[in-house]
């Protein structure tokens, strides 16, 4: 007998992970699939971080760690926030969790009651929507256009706010679009938030170290809303540590305490060895972040140049992260005689089957006319992938 809760039935399967699984299944059959679906740096974790993990094992970091994270790690994160972001978070305002997703759901479950409205800016990262649903909240989608570089305007946010609005989830640099809000744009949004005292903001800044044009600006650095912003970050993207599963928040003390209580009942403190590795990463003075950023910058220019040569694609050049989100609406309704493309998900499956290139349909990101392409892959494979995509798209008419 199967009996599932309404809560679990309400969740969608992560489309990024689903596409990755499909491509892995094809690879297991010997099919040469180029994966441009997962948001994962293709670099190895720097050696100095791995050495810190090995030392932690030798030093017997094998007992239960503190629920919010080791004190020295939270002190290092506090220092990082002050020096890199211009935000004063004491160690008691910081909670270390098992990756950015864990940090986000801790916050959302701690503040959202059934019926509370949560503003999500589309295109959005896939898990925002489902995490809000899981908490009983109501997602309110504010959609940015490709013509405005996938950035929402402050008046759009203002129009979406009601007396039930409890939270807005903000993300710059963006997954899935790679766009970056500049300081002026962010301040104008912060001024909207300032007027609505019951409204909190999650600022997801996991891609802060991967910016090619302009600067990274933290939402909490605007002091007039500092006490209503929760900053979410982690070591996955900036240090090529996706598998280590370390994320963290900086938040008002009252909310940090709530997340600590929640985490204490669900997971307790996260992996001790991974925490020691994260400490080394954050304190490290090496150039690994710059090396990765330079590589992603080069790849951005490479893949965007190639995609722009494909008739029918609309491409906006991203300013950060390692994604590009071309508009594929030109191909909707077209067919190769065997497959009819009705949606962006259809196109993503078509490219996987006919071109052996894994992308992700835009509907999961609130962008049904787009697909997301991750260029966290080698230059040679990016060139080959776009060559395959172009050939497959030319068969649609």
Image (cartoon, rainbow, N blue to C red):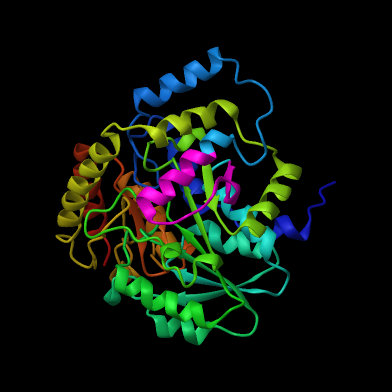
- The span picked out in magenta is 74-97
Is 190 rendered above or below residue 17?
below
Residue 185: x, y in percent?
33, 74
Quadrant assignment, res 33: top left
Q: Nearer the viewer, residue 85 or 23?
A: 85
Residue 290: x, y in percent?
24, 40
Point 76% across, 60% down: residue: 6
Is 174 rendered above or below residue 50?
below
Is 280 rendered above or below residue 114?
above
Q: Is residue 314 left or right of residue 269?
A: left
Q: Is residue 223 left or right of residue 72?
A: left
Q: Is residue 38 visible?
A: no
Point 47% across, 73% down: residue: 224
Is 112 rendered above or below residue 204?
below
Quadrant assignment, res 118: bottom right
Point 66% across, 35% down: residue: 66
Q: Is residue 245 left or right of residue 8?
A: left
- Number of numbered discs: 0
In the rendered image, residue 77 lying in the magenta stretch gets the answer yes
Q: Nearer the viewer, residue 325 or 388?
A: 325
Q: Residue furthest top?
A: 58
Q: Residue furthest right?
A: 1
Q: Nearer the viewer, residue 121 or 310?
A: 121
Please tell me whether the stretch drawn in magenta is mainly helix, strand or loop: helix
Q: Nearer the viewer, residue 33 or 241?
A: 241
In the rendered image, residue 267 lying in the magenta stretch gets the answer no
Point 20% across, 43% down: residue: 294
Q: Is residue 228 left or right of residue 219?
A: right
Residue 123: x, y in percent?
42, 67
């Amino acid at each position: 007998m199967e009996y599932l809760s309404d809560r679990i039935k309400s969740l969608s399967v992560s489309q990024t992970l689903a596409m990755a699984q499909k491509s892995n299944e094809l690879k297991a059959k010997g099919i040469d699939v180029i994966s441009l679906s997962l948001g994962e740096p293709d670099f190895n974790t720097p050696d100095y971080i791995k050495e810190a993990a090995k030392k932690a094992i030798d030093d017997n970091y094998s007992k239960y760690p503190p629920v919010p994270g080791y004190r020295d790690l939270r002190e290092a994160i506090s220092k990082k926030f002050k020096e890199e972001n211009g935000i004063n978070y004491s160690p008691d305002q910081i909670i270390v969790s098992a990756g950015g997703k864990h940090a986000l759901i801790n916050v959302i479950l701690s503040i959202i009651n059934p019926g509370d409205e949560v503003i999500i800016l589309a295109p959005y990262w896939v898990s925002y929507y489902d995490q809000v649903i899981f908490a009983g909240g109501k997602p309110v989608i504010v959609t940015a256009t490709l013509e405005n570089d996938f950035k929402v305007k402050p008046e759009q946010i203002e129009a979406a706010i009601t007396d039930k609005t409890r939270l807005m989830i903000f993300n710059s640099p963006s997954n899935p679009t790679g766009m970056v809000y500049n300081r002026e744009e962010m301040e104008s949004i912060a001024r909207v938030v300032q007027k609505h005292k019951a409204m909190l903001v999650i600022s997801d800044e996991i891609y802060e170290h991967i910016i090619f044009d302009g600067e990274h600006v933290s939402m909490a650095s605007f002091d007039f809303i500092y006490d209503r912003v929760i900053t979410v970050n982690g070591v996955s993207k900036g240090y090529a540590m996706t598998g280590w599963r370390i994320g963290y928040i900086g938040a008002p003390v009252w909310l940090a305490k709530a997340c600590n209580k929640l985490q204490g009942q669900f997971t307790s403190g996260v992996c001790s060895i991974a925490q020691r590795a994260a400490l080394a990463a954050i304190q490290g003075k090496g150039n690994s972040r710059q090396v990765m950023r330079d590589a992603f910058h080069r790849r951005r220019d490479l893949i965007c140049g190639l995609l722009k040569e494909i008739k029918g694609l609309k491409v906006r050049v991203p300013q950060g992260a390692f994604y590009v989100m071309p508009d594929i609406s030109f191909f909707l309704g077209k067919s190769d005689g065997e497959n009819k493309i009705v949606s962006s998900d259809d196109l993503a499956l078509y490219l996987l089957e006919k071109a052996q290139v894994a992308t992700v349909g835009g509907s999961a990101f609130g962008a049904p006319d787009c697909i997301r392409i991750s260029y966290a892959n080698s230059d040679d494979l990016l060139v080959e992938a776009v060559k395959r995509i172009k050939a497959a798209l030319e068969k649609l008419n």
